[in-house]
Image (spheres, rainbow, N blue to C red):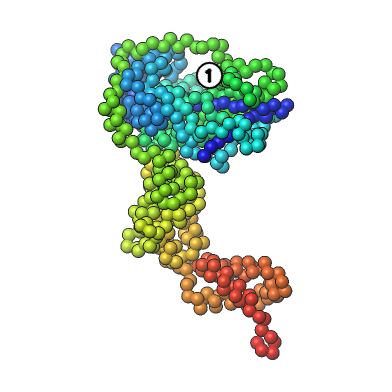
Amino acid sequence: MKRAAERIIGPKGGAWDVFIGLEVHAQIQLRSKLFSRSQAAAPSKDDEPNSRVSLFDASFPGTLPVLNASAVDQAVKAALALGCTVHRRSVFERKHYFYSDLPHGYQITQQWHPIATGGSLPLIFDPAGPTKAKAGGAAKVRSADELQGDGNDLGLHVPAIGITRIQLEVDSGKSLHDRKGKGAERSLVDLNRAGTALMEIVFEPEIRSAAEAGAALRSLQLFLRRVGACDGNMEDGSMRCDLNVSVRPGGTEGLGERVEVKNMNSVRHLMTAAAAEAVRQARQLEMGEGPIERETRGFDVSKGETIHLRRKEGSVDYRFFPEPDLPPIVVTDEHVEALRATLPELPEATMARLSAEYGLAEHLSRLIVCAAGGASDYYEDLVNGTGRERGHAAGEGSGPYRREPKVAANWLSNNLFGLLKAQLGSGDSDEGGLERRFPAERLGGLLDLLSEGTVSSQTAKNVLREMALEDHSSTAMEIVEAKDLKQITDQAEIESLCRGIVQDPRHAKQLASYRSGKTNLSKFFMGQAFKATRGRVDGKVVETCVMKLLQQPEPSAANP
């Protein structure tokens, strides 16, 4: 898979190249915080404010940080999965700034000596997928194919985004602004999140479109979930993303002045903000409204526009210096290799194996690997028989498999994913979420009924819908038996039903029209037959039977 860069077409027709960098803050999945024994903040909004705060988190004098070693291990695993260089020695620093929800007056981070650098993120998600960003204004987003034929003049780049660094740091608390109470407005501080372990993953400005930015963030979520480093749920705040966007005249060298867009809380908002900011910059430059200034902007969801927050007059002096209360992190070669040995199969390898082992087309393998909730493990359980209903004989399947791999993949991707999309919430995005929501044995039992001919394809779809949306406990066989949905296979019964449809006096007009040459009316009779049988007859069998009856000569009045 390769992707062409996109260009912004300004209001006067000029072409502008787009460059996007991401800074992702991912909360590390841990029981306790980075430097204290307080419980890590839960994603639940029901937590009492300031109920997960230690004396260190609140910056009481005399308290000292104690490093959570598991956070280092998780960061190293994430770095290894992304092909980064893990540094055997890294250092914590203090980044000084003042804000109400930062009780220490500084953040402990790794700006100058991070735990890992380099590496790249493969774009497992296809940037040309169905999710599109929209941006208003007097400019258009066009692909390289539209501008330069096949896009080769712009250069087709490898679908992997370079990583600058991965650093460990602590999260801040939350400021809550109370505007509903009587009297003066007030701001409250909740320190539950303060001290939570973060990985900041900084990407090179190599992303060339809003769609590619969305694909990169989704791919990062997939990698971090696979290694268990972060649940990646943006709606819960456990992953947040800032954008750096710049444009330059098409075909020129160098990068334009970058503008930061803060705190994207969904992939869709990220894509819309990236497109909107690129359009804004191209329009400003082309209309002669002045140069692009380095600034920080927010995103107005209701308008789909970026908004000015503050200017960056120069580099801010955060007065970085080494954290005096923490020694350097030293990671040995042996420990790195031990952690490498614990890595699960990574998404790229899983996608290649599904295609090679099960004969799946690349788009099917990609769809299964990219689906939330551990869909690739779910798929293999389904194919290999783990999902067989107890006491029910499964179909013979194909080769060594319990169920035909391509049939299982199509039912999973074309039917179950769509039905469960609204139900798979943030709590089901981990590797076992799909199995918890809809056990593989339930879908496996339905596919067995289909392969045996017990139910028709249409009946199977109807039963799956009921299982997914209404009846969350019954097996497929129980629903089929309770509603008398077993497929009619007796040929004489099928022919009798179809004959009744064709010869029904209520259909005499349609029959006469068919025999006078309007052969497309055959679909009418087939539809009536399906309706009469409630979809319990195989479609091809119905079609053959109806066509045979329609093509029989009309009986004469003398010889009925």
Q: Residues within 10 Å of mark 1 (few under 14, many from 20)?
A: few
Which amino acid, by three-letter code, is at mark 1?
Ala
Residue on which disc 1 sits: 184
Residue 451 appears in the picture as rendered: yes
Image height of 151 relative to 23, above or below: below
Image height of 237 relative to 410, above or below: above
In the rendering, at what x and y percent does residue 303 appear?
62, 30
Q: Quadrant of the C terminus?
A: bottom right
* Residue 180 shown left or right of residue 559 in the figure: left
At a point 35% along the width and 22% down the height, the residue shown is: 87
At a point 57% along the width and 71% down the height, the residue shown is: 544
Q: Quadrant of residue 13?
A: top right
At a point 45% along the width and 56% down the height, the residue shown is: 407
Image height of 224 relative to 415, above or below: above
Residue in front for this viewpoint, 339 or 60? 339
* Residue 470 shown left or right of residue 229 in the figure: right
At a point 34% along the width and 28% down the height, the residue shown is: 76
Number of numbered tags placed on the structure image: 1
In the rendering, at what x and y percent does residue 274 appear?
57, 29
